[in-house]
Image (spheres, rainbow, N blue to C red):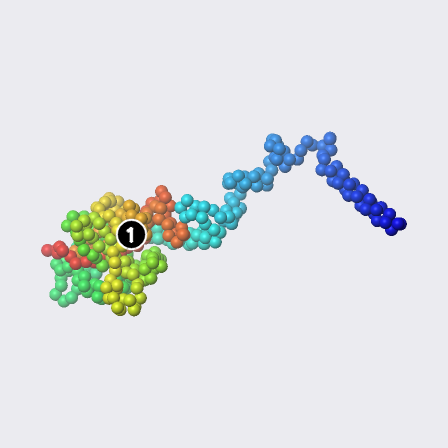
């Protein structure tokens, strides 16, 4: 009996202590009558006017989806959340982090490339004194010398397109690591006075990307996941009935076994159509060029533009530009909407000439 009464007494004391603790806490939470009406935080929560509360302001601003005055912290928090981009769709933290690093890397490459481009444009003053020609530039002569056979005369005979392909001139140091960009651009500049007879009429032209820089490497490897082949771009074809209709020659890799059984699989096929017309040159705005536009087609070349000029009968130097809206590698390499076109690579087209110089 005594033990039972002691247990009841202990429980009663515990209950009393708990009630006292709650009363003390409630009294502590209740501000004294003669104290300040509310703290800054309370005023903020109540919507009253008073001193600023930067931390709470920042939290409330973040919750409303707005941008706060702490851009660095905002950047990290945005990086850590899943976002939905109108251009690239939902993106995760890993995708955005990779894209930001890659964008910085490619922007540095672009900065160096633009510096080189500015230097080329600055050379326009010197090029203004060059004689206009579509047959007798220094680059055309050097190319002719590498494909000619005894008896062929520069300025009279057409470029030997068969030997150009068989000797793999595209893979030579002359058109790769040892490419003279100045000589190439001079030839392109001199060819601004081409006529309608110089425009490709019909047929396919063997092509290759010139140079050995970073953008050239990207161009040669881009699309490998679909073609399973490096350097898959092999030229262009101009339709016989409608020369303004252009397609690109793409080499697909079917494997040694299939290509051995079906030799025709080794030949490139026509893909990625575009429309050709004579329009102003991006490289030389005061001059014209044969421009191939892909913007009306939904394929990998849609945000690119080619322009080319004849430098010798059957031979064309081309320049590819990335147009605003272009995006590659998940946005790592892109040209923003509203920006100027960006030069990417030079290329060469060689075909059988229909017109010879006299």
- Please indicate, yes or no, whether residue 326 appears anywhere in the rendered image: yes
**Looking at this view, is 59 or 340 the one in front?**
59
Q: Residue at x 32, y 52 (%)?
A: 300
Residue wearing tag 1? 320
- Please indicate, yes or no, whether residue 124 appears anywhere in the rendered image: no
Q: Is residue 358 above or below residue 324?
A: below
* x then y, percent, for residue 123: 28, 50
Q: Is residue 50 above or below residue 128?
A: above
Q: Quadrant of residue 218?
A: bottom left
Q: Is residue 146 above or below residue 79?
A: below
Q: Residue at x 34, y 46 (%)?
A: 324
* x then y, percent, for residue 259: 27, 66
* x then y, percent, for residue 260: 26, 69
**Looking at this view, is 174 or 316 the one in front?**
316
Left or right of 221 in this view: 137: left
Crowdedness of circle 1 by 10 Å Cα count: few (<14), some, many (20+)?
A: many
Q: Is residue 47 above or below residue 73?
A: above
**Looking at this view, is 338 or 110 the one in front?**
338
């Amino acid at each position: 009996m005594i033990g039972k009464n002691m247990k009841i007494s202990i429980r009663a004391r515990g209950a009393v202590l708990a009630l006292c603790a709650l009363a003390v806490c409630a009294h502590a939470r209740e501000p004294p009558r003669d104290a300040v009406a509310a703290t800054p935080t309370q005023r903020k929560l109540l919507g009253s006017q008073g001193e600023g509360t930067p931390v709470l302001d920042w939290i409330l601003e973040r919750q409303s989806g707005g941008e706060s005055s702490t851009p660095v912290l905002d950047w990290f928090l945005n990086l850590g959340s899943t976002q939905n981009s109108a251009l690239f769709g939902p993106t995760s933290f890993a995708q955005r982090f990779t894209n930001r690093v890659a964008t910085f890397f490619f922007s540095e490459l672009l900065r160096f490339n633009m510096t080189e481009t500015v230097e080329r444009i600055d050379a326009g003053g010197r090029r203004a004194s060059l004689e206009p020609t579509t047959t007798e530039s220094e680059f055309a002569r050097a190319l002719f010398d590498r494909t000619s056979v005894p008896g062929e005369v520069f300025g009279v005979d057409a470029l030997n397109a068969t030997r150009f392909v068989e000797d793999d001139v595209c893979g030579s140091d002359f058109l790769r690591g040892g490419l003279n960009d100045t000589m190439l651009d001079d030839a392109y500049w001199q060819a601004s006075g081409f006529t309608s007879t110089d425009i490709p009429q019909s047929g396919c032209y063997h092509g290759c990307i010139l140079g050995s820089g970073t953008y050239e490497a990207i161009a040669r490897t881009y699309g490998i996941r679909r073609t399973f082949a490096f350097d898959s771009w092999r030229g262009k074809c101009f339709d016989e009935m409608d020369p303004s209709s252009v397609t690109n020659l793409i080499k697909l890799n079917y494997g040694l076994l299939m290509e051995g059984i079906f030799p025709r699989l080794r030949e490139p096929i026509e893909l990625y159509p575009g429309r050709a017309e004579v329009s102003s040159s991006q490289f030389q705005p005061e001059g014209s060029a044969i421009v191939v536009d892909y913007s009306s087609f939904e394929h990998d070349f849609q945000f690119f533009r080619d322009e080319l000029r004849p430098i010798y009968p059957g031979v064309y130097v081309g320049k590819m530009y990335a147009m605003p809206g272009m995006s590659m590698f998940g946005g790592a390499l892109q040209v923003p909407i509203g920006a100027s076109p960006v030069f990417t690579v030079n290329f060469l087209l060689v075909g059988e000439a229909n017109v010879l110089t006299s």
